[in-house]
Amino acid sequence: MEKIRIVIVEDLPEVMEGLCAFISQDEALEICGTYRTAEAAELELPILQPDIVIMDINLPGKTGIECVRTVKQTSPSIQFMMFTVYENNDQVFEALKAGASGYLLKKTPPLQIIEAVKELQQGGSPMSASIARKLVTLFYDQHGPATGEAASVLTPREKEVLELIAKGLLYKEIAEQLGISFHTVRQHIGKIYEKLHVQNKTEAINKVYGKRI
């Protein structure tokens, strides 16, 4: 089994050291690079082609969001997980618009960060619960419950699963809440992505609720 190759872009030494320490303990993960500035990351990421980049926003010089936007233009397959203290709407939406697929706050416990990295690699879009709630609030305020042409292709159960995904629940939490297996949740999510012709959670929510971030 190939390891998930990870790059960390973070300017605070203590945060960088902490991330490296617990990520290195998981046999499924491999750190293939660390950078303290967006400028350095921009040069190396297209060469390294990691699976996932854990990206801080507030970096010296260029911001992490600017780095994501630049790298995504030439290396769209690289997945970015924002890792920051910021949870205001502007930062969240700008990061997602730039091409980030996940958004975690730095107060997230280490085990949840590991789970989020693996979920991102599996096609998910992990977000801290408070961030997911912001997205759900936006979509519901603008458009109400999932309706319309996109939603019509989904079964009631699939709509239910998508709503829980949008609320930031992990696959295992969705399974527990709906009383189904983890494998069944993954099957539902695969069907949702297939029916909507999308690749991740953010795209699915955008399409169903009709709001382009």
Image (cartoon, grey):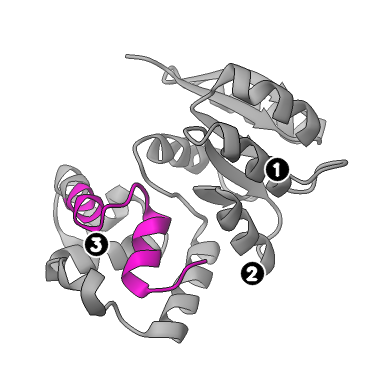
Residue 175, placed above or below residue 116:
below
Residue occupying the far top of the picture: 1
Q: Amino acid at mark 2?
A: Asn
Predominant SS along the magenta part: helix
Pointer 3 residue: 161
Q: Camera-side residue: 184 or 111?
A: 184
Which residue lies at the image location 63% right of the left edge and 36% below the top edge? 71
Percent x, y of residue 187:
16, 46
Which residue lies at the image location 15% right of the left edge and 66% below the top edge? 153
Pointer 1 residue: 56
Which residue lies at the image location 63% right of the left edge and 25% below the top edge? 45
- Start and end of the magenta stretch? 188-213
Which residue lies at the image location 26% right of the left edge and 52% below the top edge? 197
Residue occupying the far front of the picture: 74
Whether residue 83 can be seen here: yes
Percent x, y of residue 159:
22, 68
Q: Amino acid at mark 1?
A: Asp
Of labels 2 and 3, earlier in sequence is 2
Percent x, y of residue 79:
50, 37
Q: Amino acid at mark 3?
A: Val
Q: Residue 47, located in which quarter of the rendered image?
A: top right
